[in-house]
């Protein structure tokens, strides 16, 4: 009995916690399982203020949002298992390794909110100590308060690269350059402007050709690139640095959904292969829902809204809060549409609409 | 559409079909290989790579295996492709006196057939294979056992077959056999009919379905094996490892308590360290129709058995799992040769867990038969 839950959620990041709060608020017995030692996913390293409207917690910093979500979840009696790995889904069973022991959970509904992982990029010297993901830098400086190095070059000008470069400056490091292979900056202008004002050169059409050093990265050779991303002869410059940050995008962590047998679609805009889902976040497998970056790489704000949607829908499918469910879901969807607007959001909104359309086709094929 | 004519049409792009195509093409026959999916998409891409002699029953089974082992030593050079062949020797782990008695009689018969197998007490067995639990009875050791990468083996056979002129057609499903006055003379596919002197049905578990319309009822059925895959590790397991309960389950299933999960799922240890360092840890032996899914009970039973025999594996990370469907036959022997009463049809299927070990000899014997 104790291992029987209405809803089991894999991932205690913003999507998973938001799903848990909505499900538990409606009366569902809810468990969140996360392999990390702390809940919150990436929220606790986000010390910057969020954008959007008041409803989207604009002006509130990421870690504060995480604390509020955790407090809500605790108040509603959500169980959270940390240091626990969901390793398999078998029909309505969830296989978890907790404290070295295999535990089988019975779950009426399953929500996968496993997030995304940072992409790697290969160049000679990429395995030298001191070359690390931007996410690792963010964890070191914002969570552990440790500076990874003094002179940093950042590769990638998406929002992660821009924000982490700024946070490095705040933490007292020198960002020698931010390097971007494409011909234009990838992230928001407001973030790029901040680091430019601080004097960090943003070098577009440039990449890291190689890193070098004895036992630790001591420098990088940058290469100018032409429009087809080929190195321009004679376009090499060398920088003396002690840290390289890699911020070249994220890929949805979809293994559990693949294993379970969900149908997938390839969406470059959303970071790769993502599971098809309907407007309630339910995949092509009945009772298996997805929310957050597993459905396509976006931001914590949209991840939380998707989590709410999945939580409301999964609970309603079990009869919890069913009467108000349609209105509740409509409210979440309209907030999500606002988040997915503007020149950056619109592309994601189109990609997301495409997922829903393909999910409908998949359903009609099955019938 | 042009009439397509070959000496031999091979159905199935697993290790057996590609081996037949290789040896037949090498012997100068015109060969087409028809595979509904891609090379090694079925059982050959979902198994371990054991070339193990000492698990074979003395008699024709062991003779075939030993002939195959000799062919393997030539193939490494002939195929000109790295099949990750490793002649590392094999052990069969013995847990208790009952198993020891079975293995002693097995080993004596093998010796009479010319296969040298030693029985090692646990201290000596652990000296050679550090990961073994100290409270086991011991293990057998056979230097003739080896390992190969099954996917690369099928690739190696098919590439070499193509070099010898074979026409490989992955993505081509055979939809039926063409018979003329009782003689099989071709196959139908979505891409047209193909005519030939001989059809070699090497489609593993799918073979009975292919030949049933001709009134031939082959006793081959799918038997599922579930396998765990670990993260790449430094050298951890030096041999290919089986346990004696694999042989008990295979040759003396009546000795097992059918209620116990371990036995119900037919669990027997089969562990190898692949060339990239990962361990393959198997396996169940269950009848589950054509369902290739893994099950929680199956994976748990395999992991529990591996931990019992190789306690060091308890702290190793499993990164994935998979299941394959072995072509089981009731007598444990493959079906190789011309179909009785159906001229033109050759069967090469039903190797269950021995397909990797027996693929060269199967291919060679079929090619010799069709000379």
Image (spheres, rainbow, N blue to C red):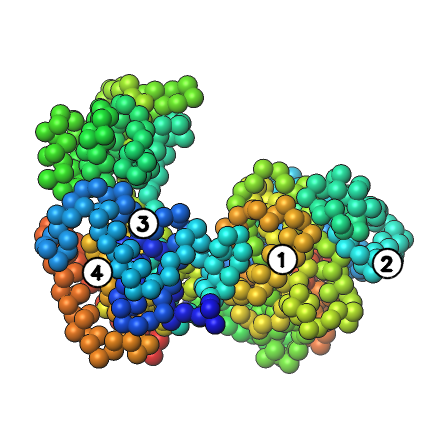
Residue appearing at x 16%, y 74% in the figure? A327
B264 or B154, nearer to the observer: B264
Image side of residue B24 versus residue B192, left or right: right
Chain for disc number 3: A
Q: Give the number of the mark in front: 2 or 1.
A: 1
Where residue B282 sits: x, y (%)? 62, 56
Secondary structure of residue under mark 3: loop
Chain for disc number 2: B
Where residue A238 sits: x, y (%)? 27, 19
Q: Are marks 3 and 2 on the same chain?
A: no
Q: Are marks 4 and 3 on the same chain?
A: yes
Image side of residue B272 versus residue A121, left or right: right
Residue appearing at x 18%, y 71% in the figure? A328
Residue underneath mark 1 = B304
Residue underneath mark 2 = B101
Residue underneath mark 4 = A305
Q: Residues within 10 Å of mark 1 (few under 14, many from 20)?
A: some
Residue underneath mark 3 = A41
Q: Give the number of the mark in front: 2 or 4.
A: 4
Where residue B292 sits: x, y (%)? 53, 66
The span from disc 3 to disc 2 (Cα, nearest Å) is: 56 Å
């Amino acid at each position: 009995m104790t291992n029987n839950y209405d809803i089991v959620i894999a991932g205690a990041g913003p999507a998973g916690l938001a799903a848990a709060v909505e499900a538990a608020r409606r009366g569902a017995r809810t468990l969140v399982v996360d392999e990390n030692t702390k809940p919150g996913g990436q929220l606790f390293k986000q010390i910057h203020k969020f954008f959007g409207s008041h409803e989207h917690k604009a002006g509130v910093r990421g870690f504060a949002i995480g604390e509020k979500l955790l407090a809500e979840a605790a108040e509603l009696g959500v169980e959270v298992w940390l240091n626990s790995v969901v390793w398999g889904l078998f029909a309505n069973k969830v296989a978890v390794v907790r404290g070295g022991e295999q535990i089988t959970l019975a779950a009426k509904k399953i929500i996968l909110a496993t997030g995304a992982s940072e992409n790697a990029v290969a160049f000679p010297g990429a395995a030298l100590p001191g070359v690390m993901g931007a996410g690792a830098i963010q964890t070191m400086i914002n969570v552990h308060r440790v500076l990874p190095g003094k002179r940093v070059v950042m590769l990638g000008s998406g929002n992660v690269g821009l924000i982490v470069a700024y946070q490095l400056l705040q933490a007292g490091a020198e960002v020698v350059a931010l390097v971007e292979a494409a011909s234009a900056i990838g992230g928001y202008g407001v973030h790029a402007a901040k680091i430019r004002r601080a004097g960090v050169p943003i070098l577009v059409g440039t990449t890291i050709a190689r890193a070098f050093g004895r036992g630790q990265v001591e420098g990088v050779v940058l290469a100018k690139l032409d429009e087809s991303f080929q190195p321009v002869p004679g376009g090499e410059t060398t920088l003396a640095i002690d840290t390289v940050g890699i911020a070249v995008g994220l890929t949805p962590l979809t293994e559990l959904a693949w294993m379970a047998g969900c149908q997938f679609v390839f969406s470059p805009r959303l970071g790769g292969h993502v599971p098809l889902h309907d407007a309630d976040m339910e995949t092509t497998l009945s009772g298996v829902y997805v929310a957050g970056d597993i459905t396509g790489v976006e931001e914590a704000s949209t991840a939380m809204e998707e989590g709410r949607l999945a939580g409301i829908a999964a609970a309603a499918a079990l009869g919890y809060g069913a009467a108000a469910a349609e209105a509740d879901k409509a409210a979440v969807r309209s907030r999500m549409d606002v988040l997915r607007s503007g020149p950056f959001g619109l592309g994601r909104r189109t990609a997301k609409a495409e997922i829903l359309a393909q999910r409908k086709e998949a359903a009609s094929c099955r019938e | 559409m042009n009439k397509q004519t070959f000496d031999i049409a091979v159905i199935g792009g697993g290790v057996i079909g590609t081996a037949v195509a290789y040896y037949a093409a090498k012997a100068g026959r015109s060969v087409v290989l028809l595979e509904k999916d891609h090379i090694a998409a079925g059982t050959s891409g979902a198994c371990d790579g054991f070339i193990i002699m000492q698990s074979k029953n003395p008699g024709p089974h062991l003779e075939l295996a030993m002939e195959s082992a000799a062919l393997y030593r030539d193939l490494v050079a002939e195929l000109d492709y790295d099949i990750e062949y490793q002649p590392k020797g094999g052990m069969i782990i013995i847990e208790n006196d009952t198993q020891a008695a079975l293995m002693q009689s097995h080993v004596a018969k093998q010796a009479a057939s010319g296969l040298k197998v030693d029985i090692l007490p646990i201290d000596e067995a652990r000296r050679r294979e550090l990961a073994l639990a100290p409270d086991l009875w011991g293990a057998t050791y056979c230097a003739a056992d080896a390992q190969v990468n099954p996917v690369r083996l099928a690739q190696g056979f098919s590439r070499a077959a193509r070099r010898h002129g074979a026409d490989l057609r992955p993505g081509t499903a055979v939809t039926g056999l063409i018979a003329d006055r009782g003689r099989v003379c071709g196959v139908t596919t979505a891409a047209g009919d193909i005519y030939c002197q001989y059809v070699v049905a090497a489609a593993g578990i799918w073979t009975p379905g292919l030949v049933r319309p001709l009134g031939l009822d082959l006793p081959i059925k799918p038997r599922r094996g579930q396998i765990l895959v670990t993260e790449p590790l430094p050298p951890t397991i030096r041999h290919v490892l089986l346990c004696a309960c694999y042989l008990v389950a295979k040759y003396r299933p009546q000795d097992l308590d059918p209620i116990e999960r371990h036995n119900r799922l037919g669990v027997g240890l089969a562990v190898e360290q692949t060339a990239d360092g990962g361990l393959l840890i198997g396996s169940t032996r269950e009848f589950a129709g054509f369902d290739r899914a893994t099950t929680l009970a199956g994976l748990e039973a395999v992991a529990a058995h591996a931990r019992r025999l190789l306690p060091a594996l308890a702290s190793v990370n499993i990164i994935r799992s998979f299941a394959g469907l072995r072509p089981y036959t009731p007598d444990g022997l493959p079906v190789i040769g011309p179909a009785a009463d159906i001229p033109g049809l050759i069967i090469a299927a039903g190797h269950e867990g021995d397909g990797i070990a027996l693929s060269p000899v199967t291919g060679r014997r079929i090619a010799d038969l069709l000379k």
